[in-house]
């Protein structure tokens, strides 16, 4: 154990004692551990301890790494000896297939990243939406609304209520200017949001009363011990209604891009076969 600690300590400090028999110098590098005919080199463990650690912590990290490396090598060698030839061949085939898949997928992804057109026009989105809208039914309720929550002693509360209710361009600008004084707010009533999120963010709402309050073209004001809540509901969509385009636009973009990617890869594979056939690199024997 003392020898191991000495070896690791010298490794961490960068000091090499070429005369020490535990540091054998070979073409590949300085050996710090061996399991039968497999070697762990100094360069393999450089940097694993990171910076800012105590000598003891660094020592423990490197020692654990060496022990884990040795355990893995010993178990693998035992497995190769004791598993049946049939299983070993099957595993080797899986490993080879996995290696091939890694290379092939990396190559395809590189080509896709380099060559695939990722721009999607508004017309493309609308066309895909119209052709497939029945596939985009809601599995939860959505609502368009605006709301403001302020303390009961808010200055010029009546003027705030008028601006919030009228909500013309000037009012919207004034409300945004005052927004730092609000307890909470949302003024974008053109965006569709989940009813479940609204219930969580507006304290006066809950699963029992949400249907009473959240109705299309409804507005209400509630005062409790915590403050004043002003809400204007613009519209609401129930479960199984068609999702609005604006709400699922990111999903549609991803679907369209995935379709393009699949088409690109199919063409790539077809062109690859044709090119190899023409260059006599590929032949099917009958």
Image (cartoon, rainbow, N blue to C red):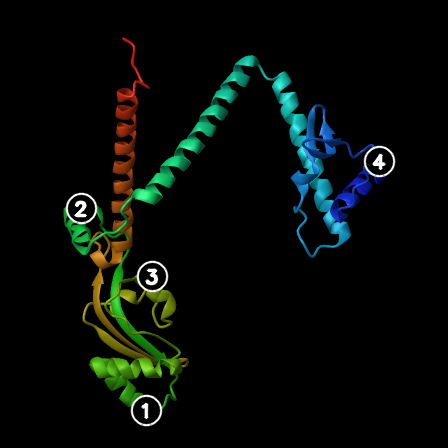
The residue wearing badge 4 is 19
The x, y position of residue 187, in whole percent, is: 29, 74
Which quarter of the rendering shows the N terminus? top right
Please name the residue shown 73% across and 33% down the image: 33
Q: Nearer the viewer, mark 3 or mark 4?
A: 4
Q: What label sits on residue 132 in the rendered view?
A: 2
Question: Closer to us: mark 1 or mark 2?
Answer: 2
Instruction: Give the percent coordinates (x, y) of residue 95.
Output: 50, 25
Which callout, 1 or 4, points at the residue further toward the start of the chain? 4
As measured in the structure, the alpha-carbon distance from the residue carrying label 3 to the one carrying label 4 is 71 Å
Disc with the residue nearer the chain's start (3 vs 1): 1
Q: Mark 3 packing: few (<14 Cα in 10 Å), some, or many (20+)?
A: some
The alpha-carbon separation of the residues under discs 4 and 2 comes to: 75 Å
Disc 4 element: loop
Pinpoint residue 204: horizontal percent, then vertical percent: 35, 72
Q: Position of residue 71 (x, y in %)?
A: 68, 31
Q: Are dots 2 and 3 in contact, CB under 8 Å?
A: no
Disc 1 and disc 2: Cα gap in Å?
49 Å
As rendered, which of 3 and 213 lies closer to the eye? 3
Could you tell me if residue 113 is visible in this image? yes
Q: Can you say whether 151 is above or below 98 in the image?
A: below
SS assignment at label 1: loop
């Amino acid at each position: 154990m003392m020898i191991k600690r000495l070896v690791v300590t010298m490794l961490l400090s960068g000091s090499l004692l070429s005369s020490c028999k535990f540091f054998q110098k070979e073409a590949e590098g300085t050996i710090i551990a061996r399991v039968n005919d497999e070697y762990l080199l100094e360069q393999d463990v450089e940097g694993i301890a990171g910076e800012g650690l105590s000598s003891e912590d660094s020592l423990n990290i490197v020692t654990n790494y060496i022990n884990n490396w040795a355990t893995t090598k010993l178990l693998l060698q035992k497995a190769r000896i004791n598993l049946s030839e049939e299983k070993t061949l099957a595993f080797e085939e899986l490993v080879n297939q996995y290696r091939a898949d890694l290379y092939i997928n990396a190559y395809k992804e590189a080509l896709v990243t380099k060559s695939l057109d990722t721009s999607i026009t508004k017309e493309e989105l609308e066309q895909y939406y119209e052709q497939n809208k029945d596939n985009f039914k809601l599995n939860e309720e959505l609502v368009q609304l605006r709301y403001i929550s302020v303390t009961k002693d808010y200055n010029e509360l009546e003027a705030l209520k008028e601006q919030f209710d009228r909500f013309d361009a000037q009012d919207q600008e004034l409300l945004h200017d005052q927004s730092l004084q609000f307890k909470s707010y949302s003024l974008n009533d053109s965006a569709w949001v989940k009813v479940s999120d609204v219930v969580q963010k507006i304290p006066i709402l809950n699963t029992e009363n949400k249907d009473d309050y959240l109705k299309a073209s409804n507005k209400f004001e509630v005062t409790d011990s915590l403050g004043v809540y002003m809400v204007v509901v613009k519209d609401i969509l129930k479960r199984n209604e068609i999702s609005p385009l604006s709400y699922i636009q990111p999903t549609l973009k991803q679907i369209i891009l995935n379709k393009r990617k699949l088409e690109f890869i199919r063409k790539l594979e077809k062109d690859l076969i044709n090119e190899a056939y023409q260059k006599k690199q590929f032949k099917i024997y009958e």
